[in-house]
Image (cartoon, helix red, strand yellow):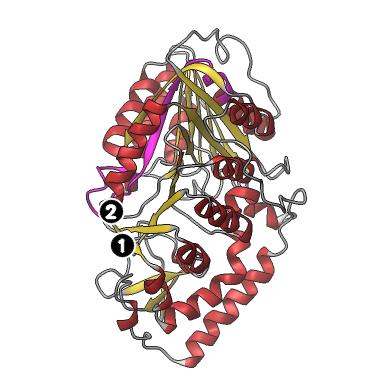
C-alpha cells in the first residue's frame, strides 16, 4: 500500500488494478457484479489495514463534529395520490417552495460536447448580466474558455457575478480568477475555511447554475472542468447532462443564485438586469427549488420522498452518488409492493469516489430483495442526477441521493412536469441503461469478503456522503 495523490477522473490504478481510497492505493481485483464470487481478497498485511482503519476512525470523529440544522425528516410519506393528480403539484409547490409555474421550455444537453457550447454561447451573448454559481471550477481548456468569455463580457459592460465553492475550486489557476476580476467581474469563493470554525468546510455549495440576462438559465450536474469534455466516450470523459430553462421559472433560478450571493457578499442584486419581465416560452410546468442546511428544511429529501410516494407506475433514478438511508429505502420498497417498477443507475467500477461505492453497496440488500433494479454504468464515471416518475414528472440538477445533498450541501434542482420532456429523458435513461450491468440480489449476496470489509469500514461515514 503506497500513498500518493491521484487524479479525480478515476483513472489512477486502472492499469495495475489498484483502487484510490481516501488517497491510498489498495491492491484490489476489478469489480464484476456477475462474478463477485471469484474475486479474491487483495494482497496486503495486517499493519497496513490497521493503519487505514485507524485513519478512518479518526476522520469519523472529526466529521462527527459537523453541526446539523433541524431535526430531519423521520417518517415516511404515505401514498395518497398519483403524480398526475393535481394535488401532487399543489403539495410540491407548497411543501417544496417556490410554486410550480406554467409556460416554460426546458432543453436537455447530453455530455460536454453539447453542454459547454450551449452554455458558452449563452454567456457570450449576454447584454446585461451573467450569474454563475458552481461547485467545480478547475484549470484547463474549459476553465479558460469560461474565464475568457466572462472577462470579455465584463469588459463590454455586462454585470458578471461568479460564486465558486472554496473546496470545489481548489484546482483553479489563480490567473483565471485575476483575469475575470481585472476585467470587472465579481468573483467570490463560498464558505472558505477559517481556523476558528474548521467544521464549516463540511458545508459546501454544490449548486451548478448559470443565468444570463435573467432570461435564460442552465442547471444540472456538470462542473467547469476538462473531465466533462467529450461525449462520455472514454474513462477520461464523464457522463453528465445540463438543462437550459426559458420562461417564468428562470426568475426562481435567479433567486436561487441570489441566495448564496447575499450570504457571501451581503449585497442584493435587483432590478431589470436580473429580474426582467419574463414572457411565455413553452408548454412545460417547471419549478426551481434550492436547499441549504442553514434552512433546516431538507427540501431535497422531501422532494424525493414526495415524488416516490406519488409514483404508481415507474421510478427511474440516475444517481452519481447513491447512499440510501432507511427512510428512502422503505419508500422504494413500498413503491415496489404497490406495483411500481423502480430502476436505479449508479456508477460502476469507473468512479471518483470508492468510499461512496462501498458505503452504498452495503445497503442494497433489502432493495434488491424487494425487486428494485440496480444497474452499474460501465464506460466511464456516471455523474447524472435525475429522477423520472410515471413518465410525467422529472427532477434534474445538482442534488445527489444521499445525506450530503439532503443535509450538508447547498443544492438546486429543476423540476419539470411534462409528458413530452419525461419521454425524452426516459429515452436517454434507457440508452444509458444499455451500457450498464445489472446487479441482482444473488450477485449482491455473492460479493467478496474484501467487498464486505470495505462496506463495514465505510458504514460509519454514510451520514457524510
Please, is residue 35 above or below residue 425 in the view? below
* Residue 369: image location, x then y, percent: 47, 67
The C terminus lies in quadrant: bottom right
Q: Is residue 68 visible?
A: yes
Taking the magenta stretch, the answer to whether it contains residue 401 is no
Circle 2 crowding by C-alpha within 10 Å: few under 14, some 14–19, many from 20: many
Q: Earlier in the sequence, mark 1 or mark 2?
A: 1
Q: Determine the residue positioned at 30% across, 55% down.
A: 380
* Residue 463: image location, x then y, percent: 63, 61
Relative to 324, 121 lies left or right: left
Instruction: Say if mark 1 contacts mark 2, CB within 8 Å.
Output: yes
* Mark number displayed over residue 404: none
394 vs 441, nearest the viewer: 441
Which residue is denoted by mark 2 in the rendering?
236
Circle 1 crowding by C-alpha within 10 Å: few under 14, some 14–19, many from 20: some
Residue span colored magenta: 228-252
* Overall secondary structure of the magenta section: loop
245 vs 362, nearest the viewer: 362
Relative to 227, 161 lies left or right: right
- Find the distance from the CA under tag 1 to the CA under tag 2: 7 Å
283 vs 176, nearest the viewer: 283
Which residue is denoted by mark 1 in the rendering?
11
* Residue 95: image location, x then y, percent: 68, 33
Q: Is residue 147 visible?
A: no
Residue sticking out furthest to the front: 338
**Label 1: element kind:** loop
Please, is residue 437 above or below residue 273 in the view? below
Amino acid at each position: 500500500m503506497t500513498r500518493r495523490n491521484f487524479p479525480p477522473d478515476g483513472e489512477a490504478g486502472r492499469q495495475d488494478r489498484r483502487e484510490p481510497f481516501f488517497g491510498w492505493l489498495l491492491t484490489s481485483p476489478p469489480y464484476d457484479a456477475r462474478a463477485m464470487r471469484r474475486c479474491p481478497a487483495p494482497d496486503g498485511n495486517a499493519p497496513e489495514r490497521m493503519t487505514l482503519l485507524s485513519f478512518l476512525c479518526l476522520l469519523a470523529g472529526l466529521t462527527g463534529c459537523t453541526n446539523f440544522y433541524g431535526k430531519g425528516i423521520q417518517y415516511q410519506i404515505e401514498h395518497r395520490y398519483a403524480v398526475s393528480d393535481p394535488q401532487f403539484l399543489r403539495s410540491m409547490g407548497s411543501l417544496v417552495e417556490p410554486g410550480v409555474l406554467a409556460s416554460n421550455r426546458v432543453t436537455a444537453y447530453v455530455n460536454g460536447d453539447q453542454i459547454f457550447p450551449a452554455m458558452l454561447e449563452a454567456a457570450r451573448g449576454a447584454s446585461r448580466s451573467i450569474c454563475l454559481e458552481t461547485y467545480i471550477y478547475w484549470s484547463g481548456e474549459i476553465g479558460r474558455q469560461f474565464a475568457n468569455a466572462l472577462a470579455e463580457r465584463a469588459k463590454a459592460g455586462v454585470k458578471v457575478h461568479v460564486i465558486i465553492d472554496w473546496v470545489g475550486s481548489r484546482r483553479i489557476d489563480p490567473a483565471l480568477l485575476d483575469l475575470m476580476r481585472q476585467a470587472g467581474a465579481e468573483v467570490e469563493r463560498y464558505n472558505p475555511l477559517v481556523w476558528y470554525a474548521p467544521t464549516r468546510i463540511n458545508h459546501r455549495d454544490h449548486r451548478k447554475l448559470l443565468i444570463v440576462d435573467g432570461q435564460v438559465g442552465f442547471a444540472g450536474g456538470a462542473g467547469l472542468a476538462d473531465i466533462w469534455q467529450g461525449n462520455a466516450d472514454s474513462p477520461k470523459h464523464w457522463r453528465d447532462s445540463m438543462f437550459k430553462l426559458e420562461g417564468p421559472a428562470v426568475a426562481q433560478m435567479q433567486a436561487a443564485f441570489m441566495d448564496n450571493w447575499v450570504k457571501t457578499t451581503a449585497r442584493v442584486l435587483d432590478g431589470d438586469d436580473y429580474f426582467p419581465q419574463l414572457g411565455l416560452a413553452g408548454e412545460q410546468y417547471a419549478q426551481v427549488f434550492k436547499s441549504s442546511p442553514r434552512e433546516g428544511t431538507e427540501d431535497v429529501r422531501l422532494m424525493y420522498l414526495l415524488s416516490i410516494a406519488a409514483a404508481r407506475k415507474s421510478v427511474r433514478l440516475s444517481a452519481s452518488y447513491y447512499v440510501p438511508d432507511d427512510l428512502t429505502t422503505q419508500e422504494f420498497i413500498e413503491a415496489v409492493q404497490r406495483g411500481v417498477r423502480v430502476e436505479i443507475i449508479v456508477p460502476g467500477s469507473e468512479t471518483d469516489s470508492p468510499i461512496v461505492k462501498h458505503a452504498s453497496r452495503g445497503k442494497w440488500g433489502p432493495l434488491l430483495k424487494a425487486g428494485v433494479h440496480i444497474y452499474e454504468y460501465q464506460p466511464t464515471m456516471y455523474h447524472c442526477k435525475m429522477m423520472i416518475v410515471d413518465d410525467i414528472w422529472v427532477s434534474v440538477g445538482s442534488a445527489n441521493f444521499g445525506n450530503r445533498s439532503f443535509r450538508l450541501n447547498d443544492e438546486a434542482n429543476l423540476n419539470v412536469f411534462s409528458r413530452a420532456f419525461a419521454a425524452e429523458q426516459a429515452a436517454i435513461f434507457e440508452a444509458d441503461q444499455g451500457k450498464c450491468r445489472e446487479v441482482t440480489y444473488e450477485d449482491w449476496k455473492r460479493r467478496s469478503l474484501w467487498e464486505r470489509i470495505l462496506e463495514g469500514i465505510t458504514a460509519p461515514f454514510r451520514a457524510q456522503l
